[in-house]
Amino acid sequence: MIDLKRIPGEKQDLDAYEVEHLFHSWSFQPAVSPLRVVSARGVRFKTDDGRERLDFSSCFVSHNIGHQDPRVVEAICEQARQLTSFVPNLSTRPRAMLGRMLEEITPGDLSRSFLSTGGTEANEAAVKICHQYTGRRKMLARYRSYHGDTATSMSLSAGDVRSWAQVLGGMELVRVPQPYCYRCMFGQSYPECDLCCATYIDEVIELEGGGDQVAGIICEPVTGANGVIVPPPEYFPRLRRICDKWGVLLIADEVMTGFGRTGRWFAMDHWDVVPDIMTMAKGITSGYMPLGATIARKHIGDRFQDQFFSHGATYAGHALACAAALAVIPIYQTDGLIENSASLGAYLLERALELKDRHPSVGDVRGLGLFVGLELVKNKKTREPIMPHAARIQPGTNPKLEVAKKLAELGVMAMAANPGNVIGLAPPLIVTKDEIDEGIAAMDEALEAADAYTEA
Ligand SMILES: Cc1ncc(COP(=O)(O)O)c(C=O)c1O
C-alpha cells in the first residue's frame, strides 16, 4: 500500500523536500528552496513570502498576454469539460482550427503544421523534416544560440554553455557565427562589413558539400537567451538568397520572438522573409498550456503525401493546449498587443538607453519591440565582458546574479538567468508606460551591483 499521507504539505517540509529531491533546471542544486509562486495576474505575481513582484521577463518570454487572463482560463475549462485529449491519429476540433489559424498568421505559404508540447520539440520536428525532405544529414547552427534542451536541439545550441555537457547525436553539425555587431567575430563594423557573417555561411555551405550534404540552417530571428542580438535588416534577406542558392532549408526558430514579442506577429515579418520552416511555442498559448508548433511551406508539407512522415508523439496536438492557443491568438489582435509591443517597445528601449548613459557596466543596449537587452561590460571602451563566458555554469556568484538578486529584493523579475552577459527585459505585451518606468527604476538601482565590478 502506498502511504500518500507521507507527501509533505507544510511549507517547511516542502522546502526541505525540494532541496533534497527535485532537480532544478540549469543550476547547481540549490541549498535553499526557491520562492513558491501562489498566484499571478496581469504583469504581477505573488510568492509565498507574501510579496507581489513585477514580471519583467514574461516567464522566459512566454506569458505575452499577461497572467491569468479569464478568457483563456475559461476556454481551457470549457474544453476540459468536453474533451481533455485524445490520440493524435484521430483529430479534435481545436487541433484542426489551430492548424488553420497558424496558416493565417504566418507569412507566405507556411501551411502544414505539426503540433507538439514545446519549443524544443518544435525544433526537433523541424530538423527531422529537414533531414527527411532533403535526404541530407548536415545542419548548420549559429554560435550563441539556444534551441532547446533535448539531444538534437541542445546540440544545435552552439556556444551556449548549457550545451557543453551534451553528447552530439542524430546529425552532423556545423557551427557558424551570428550577426553580432557589438562583438563581430570577424572584427568588422556594420555596414562597412557588407555582412561578411552571411557571406561566410555561403562559403561554409559550399565547403561542407553544398546542396548534396547540407539540409538546413536554424536561426533565432532575434537571438534571445544568448543576448537579444538584433540582426542588421539585410541579414535575413541575404541568408534567404544563400539558402535558395543551395537548396538548404531555412528554419526560423520563433519560439521566443513569435506572437508579437518584437512588434510584429513574427520577427521574420520585419524583413519580409519567409522561412522554409518556422517553429514556435511560448506565446502561442502565452504559457497557459504546453504547446509547440512546427509549420512548413506548402511544397515541403506536400512531399509527405508520398513520403512517410517519420515523427509523432502521444500528446501531439493536445486538445487542451490547442484550445488555449485558440483563445490566446485572437487576443493579440483584439487587444492591440502587437501594436503595443511596437510602441511601448520603442519606449522601453529609450528608457533602457538612459541606463547605458548612467551606468559604467552597461556597454550596449539593443532590442526590437518589447524585447530589450543590456550587455554588461567591465570596461565600456575596451568592451571587455563583465564575466567570462563560462561564468553561468561555474559555482558562486557573478555580476549578473548579483543584479538579479537586487532586482528580486526590489520586487522585479527580469531575464537574468540566461548564459552570457546580457540581461533581458521582456515584460508582457500588456505592460503600460508606468510599469515600464517602475521596472527601469528598479533596474537603475540594481545595476549598481554590476557597476561594482567595472574598472574605473
Ligand atoms: C529560441 C528558443 N528556442 C527553443 C526554446 C526551447 O523551448 P522550450 O523551453 O519550450 O522547450 C527556447 C526556450 O527558451 C528558445 O528561447
Image (cartoon, helix red, strand yellow):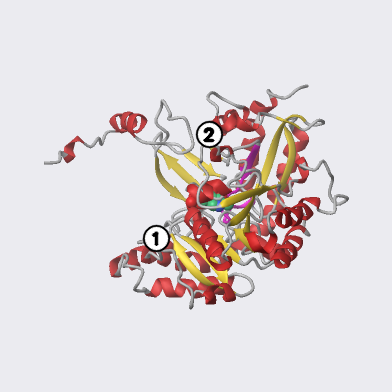
Residue 182 location (% of width, % of height): 77, 42
> How far is mark 1 from mark 2, CA to CA?
28 Å
Q: Residue at x 66, y 68 (%)?
A: 274
Q: Is residue 423 magenta?
A: yes
User: In terms of secondary structure, where does tag 1 sit?
Assistant: helix
Residue position for label 2 = 408
Q: Quadrant of the N terminus?
A: top left
Q: Is residue 342 above or below residue 157?
A: below
**Residue situated in front as seen by the camera: 11 or 315:** 315
Q: Residue at x 69, y 29 (%)?
A: 386
Q: Is residue 107 magenta?
A: no
Q: Residue at x 15, y 38 (%)?
A: 3
- Disc 1 crowd rating (10 Å Cα; few below 14, some 14-19, many 20+) is some
Q: Which residues are magenta?
A: 422-433
Q: Is residue 441 found left or right of 155 in the rendered image?
A: right
Do the numbered discs 1 and 2 sit on residues whose CB atoms are within 8 Å?
no
The amino acid pointed to by label 1 is Val
Residue position for label 1 = 73
The residue furthest left is 1
**Residue situated in front as seen by the camera: 66 or 143:** 143
Q: Is residue 18 above or below residue 179?
A: above
- Quadrant of residue 298 within the rendered picture: bottom right
